[in-house]
């Protein structure tokens, strides 16, 4: 509560001021004033602590605060105000430190509210009027303009609408809604202006429901129980028993006070907060914002992780998967023409196509006379040629789809991809397959989580089952829950929570309720919706999923150091208490010994500021990593050509087949073999000194040997072509070798990218 935080800051200010004033009075030889200042510094803390303990006791909780109350009260009662003031400062300071650590967790979800439209365009007869969203009623006809957020749930009143539902369902590819189809509020109009017939008022629409779920989940989340409180159940009775024994032995209450002063629970009060705050600081250096010690401790105990798919495990948008070409056409030509034309489009897929063309170094042309049919495609002129790029219906119309195009459509369905056909002068020459794909760091992130002790991993997504299951199988996820709306995600989190401490990782508005419900919600805040960052307990500021595993490792180390500090502090305090019980320590020496213990415990807890061991080794320069990535990009064109050749061999005759095989061999020898030999002779020796384990490169070298072996086989086939009868069996053998090389090189380069990313990650903060 805000007033409690103000009270805590006030108490620590009183404690600091009173202790300092007392020391000044003591140095001025005014012990009476010194005792008064120290008493005034202690009494408010005692009063506030007493109220807090009574409230906690009525709620069924008793923690380390009780030891502090007994120590301060006894110090005041027995005329030892300095000891009381020291304990008051340490106790109130510990609470403020914890407040600082959790302050970032309190946000009011402004992002959700700010994103929601305030007004709607309502059609009244033949004119449009702007009305507050609260005035919209069921049955109203609204106009939703291009690029606007859909304000309420409704059905399409126009012929069709292209809608981006990624904020709600996680599906990154816009969907086309026919007349009468339902549309959810919070979606984005990715096409032309359309008419919407309202089916639910603003307060009852999907988007408003998401806001309510997030708020309810945050309100219902259990408060953080401090790690120190668990040890207090042991330490408190031991302290009271030893104080009583000291009184029985000596009959002197001062000896009992010495025991209580020696038992001042500063190690318990400060060890865990300091260690966790240090862990929070260490995480921040790695681009991980942990909103307090509570989430950090919960991270350390996590057993299960639930992932959203789109934008979390995958890149969260369309990416070019492959270029399918008609017989006799070039993949680079198809992509160049398609990307050149798409430069004139604002469609969500256009940017992905243009980016792919630029990444491959293709010289894009300036399109002219461009006409765009939103949701269907574009027509234009490029260097005097009429070019079209768009859907199958736009390119083929009612004509029969050719065999190569049918194969492209089939391959797209296997990979849950969209197809953009490219035609020149009315003749289809190729197709671009686009889909969401795994993030480059996802496999490594999954491995790090397994190594960190995460036992169960579940993907829960609003995407289709086919796409979700493909990703789940590729990552060896324990369970896949597809076609889930935000409320289903919350149910999935709560189901896992009943069994084990659970983490939810997501990045979209649709993930916000689940993030708020989980024991720890982790948002990829660098690229995700700010609403998910507000709802989450941990925000990954860098756009890296592998930081989730790092966060858990940092949390585990901070918790381990906190436990070590608490146990060591308790052990040393018990030794000091035993000495005080036997009369070997009077209250003042006991206070000095306790302060030494406090300093030692705090210094040990601050070890959590430093990174753990095992991060040694030389680092890869950023420029080196980029150069390795560029080398892989340069291979893509050759690999695409190998795929096209393998496809063309299906129907090739002897003469054309021999020419295709010879061309494939040329690509393999001049591009693939040169690249692999350069990796083995130049790149891998550099990487060897940067990796902690050498067997990774040994396995990669084994892949090199297999690729070179296949290259030699293909070269042998080409050498024998003049003497061999080129029949369908020879063509099939060559086709299999070419397909094997293409597939293995793609997989191998992906693995190398994973290793490069792992090495380069050490340089990223």
Image: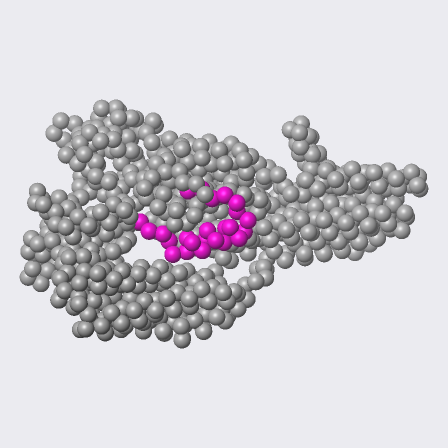
**Magenta range:** 436-459
User: Which residue is painted at 7% across and 45% down in the image?
Assistant: 399
**Is residue 283 part of the magenta span, yes or no?**
no
Q: Does residue 742 appear left or right of residue 11 in this picture?
A: left
x and y percent of residue 551 in the render?
52, 51
Residue 193 is drawn in which quadrant? top left
Residue 235 is drawn in which quadrant? top right
x and y percent of residue 434 in the render?
25, 51
* Image: 307 above or below 722: above
* Image: 332 above or below 516: below
x and y percent of residue 20 in the render?
72, 52
Number of numbered callouts drawn:
0
The one of 494 and 473 positioned closer to us in this rendering? 473
Which residue ends up furthest to the top in the rendered image? 138
Residue 189 appears in the picture as rendered: no
User: Which residue is painted at 18% across and 57% down in the image?
Assistant: 650
Quarter of the picture containing the N terminus is top right
Which residue ends up furthest to the bottom in the rendered image? 681
User: Which residue is painted at 84% across and 40% down in the image?
Assistant: 243
Residue 456 appears in the picture as rendered: yes
Residue 95 is drawn in which quadrant? top right
x and y percent of residue 372 in the render?
13, 48
User: Which residue is painted at 49% across and 57% down in the image?
Assistant: 286
The one of 412 and 198 positioned closer to us in this rendering? 412
Q: Does residue 279 appear left or right of residue 238 in this picture?
A: left
The one of 172 and 286 positioned closer to us in this rendering? 172
* Image: 134 above or below 448: above
Q: Does residue 384 appear left or right of residue 135 in this picture?
A: left
Q: How is the image coloured?
A: one colour
**Is residue 452 part of the magenta span, yes or no?**
yes
């Amino acid at each position: 509560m805000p007033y409690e935080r103000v009270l805590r800051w006030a108490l620590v200010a009183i404690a600091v001021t009173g202790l300092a004033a007392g020391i000044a009075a003591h140095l001025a030889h005014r012990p009476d004033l010194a005792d008064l200042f120290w008493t005034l510094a202690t009494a408010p803390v005692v009063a506030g602590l007493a109220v807090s303990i009574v409230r906690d006791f009525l709620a069924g909780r008793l923690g380390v605060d009780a030891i502090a109350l007994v120590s301060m009260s006894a110090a005041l009662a027995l005329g030892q105000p300095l000891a009381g003031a020291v304990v008051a400062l340490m106790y109130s300071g510990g609470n403020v430190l914890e407040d600082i650590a959790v302050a970032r967790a309190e946000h009011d979800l402004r992002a959700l509210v700010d994103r929601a439209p305030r007004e709607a365009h309502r059609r009244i007869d033949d004119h449009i009027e702007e009305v507050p969203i609260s005035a919209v009623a069921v049955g109203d006809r609204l106009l939703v303009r291009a690029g606007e957020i859909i304000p309420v749930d409704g059905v399409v009143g126009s012929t069709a609408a292209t809608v981006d539902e990624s904020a709600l369902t996680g599906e990154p590819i816009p969907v086309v809604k026919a007349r009468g189809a339902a549309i959810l509020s919070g979606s984005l109009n990715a096409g032309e202006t359309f008419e919407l017939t309202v089916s639910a008022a603003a307060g009852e629409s999907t988007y408003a429901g998401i806001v309510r779920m997030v708020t309810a989940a945050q309100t219902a989340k259990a408060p953080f129980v401090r790690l120190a409180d668990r040890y207090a159940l042991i330490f408190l009775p031991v302290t009271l028993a030893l104080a009583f024994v000291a009184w029985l032995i000596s009959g002197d209450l001062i000896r009992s006070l010495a025991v209580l002063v020696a038992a001042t629970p500063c190690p318990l009060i400060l060890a865990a907060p300091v260690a966790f705050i240090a862990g929070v600081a260490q995480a921040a250096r790695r681009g991980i914002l942990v909103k307090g010690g509570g989430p950090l401790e919960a991270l350390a105990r996590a057993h299960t992780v639930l992932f959203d798919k789109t934008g979390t495990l995958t890149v969260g948008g369309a990416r070019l998967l492959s270029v399918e070409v008609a017989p006799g056409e070039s993949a680079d030509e198809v992509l160049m023409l398609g990307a050149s034309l798409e430069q004139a489009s604002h469609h969500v897929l256009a940017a992905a196509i243009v980016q792919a063309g630029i990444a491959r170094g293709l010289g894009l042309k300036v399109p002219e006379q461009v006409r765009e049919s939103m949701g269907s495609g574009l027509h234009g002129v490029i260097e005097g040629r009429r070019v079209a790029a768009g859907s199958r219906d736009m390119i083929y119309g009612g004509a029969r789809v050719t065999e190569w195009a049918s194969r492209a459509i089939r391959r797209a369905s296997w990979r849950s991809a969209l197809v953009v056909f490219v035609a020149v002068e009315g003749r289809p020459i190729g197709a671009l397959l686009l889909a969401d794909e795994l993030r480059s760091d996802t496999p490594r992130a999954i491995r790090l989580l397994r190594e960190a002790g995460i036992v169960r991993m579940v993907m829960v997504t609003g995407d289709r089952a086919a796409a979700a299951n493909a990703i789940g199988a590729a990552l060896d996820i324990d369970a896949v829950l597809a076609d889930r709306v935000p409320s289903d995600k919350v149910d999935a989190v709560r189901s896992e929570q009943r069994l084990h401490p659970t983490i939810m990782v997501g990045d979209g508005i649709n993930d916000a309720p689940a993030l708020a419900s989980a024991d720890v919600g982790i948002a990829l805040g660098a690229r995700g919706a700010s609403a998910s960052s507000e709802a989450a307990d941990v925000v990954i500021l860098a756009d890296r999923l592998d930081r989730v595993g790092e966060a858990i490792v940092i949390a585990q180390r901070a918790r381990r150091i906190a436990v070590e500090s608490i146990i060591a502090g308790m052990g040393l305090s018990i030794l000091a208490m035993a000495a005080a019980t036997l009369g070997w320590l009077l209250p003042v020496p006991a206070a000095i010994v306790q302060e030494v213990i406090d300093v030692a415990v705090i210094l040990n807890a601050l070890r959590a500021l430093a990174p753990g061991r095992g991060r040694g080794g030389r680092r890869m320069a950023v420029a080196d990593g980029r150069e390795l990535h560029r080398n892989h990009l340069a291979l893509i064109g050759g690999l695409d050509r190998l795929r096209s050749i393998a496809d063309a061999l299906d129907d090739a005759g002897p003469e054309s087949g021999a020419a295709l095989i010879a061309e494939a061999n040329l690509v393999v020898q001049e591009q693939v073999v040169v690249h692999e030999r350069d990796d083995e002779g130049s790149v891998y020796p550099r990487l060897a000194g940067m990796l902690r384990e050498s067997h990774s490169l040994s396995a990669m070298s084994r892949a090199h040997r297999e690729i070179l072996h296949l290259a030699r086989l293909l070269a042998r086939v080409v050498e024998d072509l003049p003497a061999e009868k080129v029949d369908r069996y020879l063509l099939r053998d060559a086709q299999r070798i070419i397909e094997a090389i293409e597939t293995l090189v793609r997989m191998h380069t992906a693995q190398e990218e994973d290793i490069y990313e792992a090495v380069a990650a050490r340089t990223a903060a």
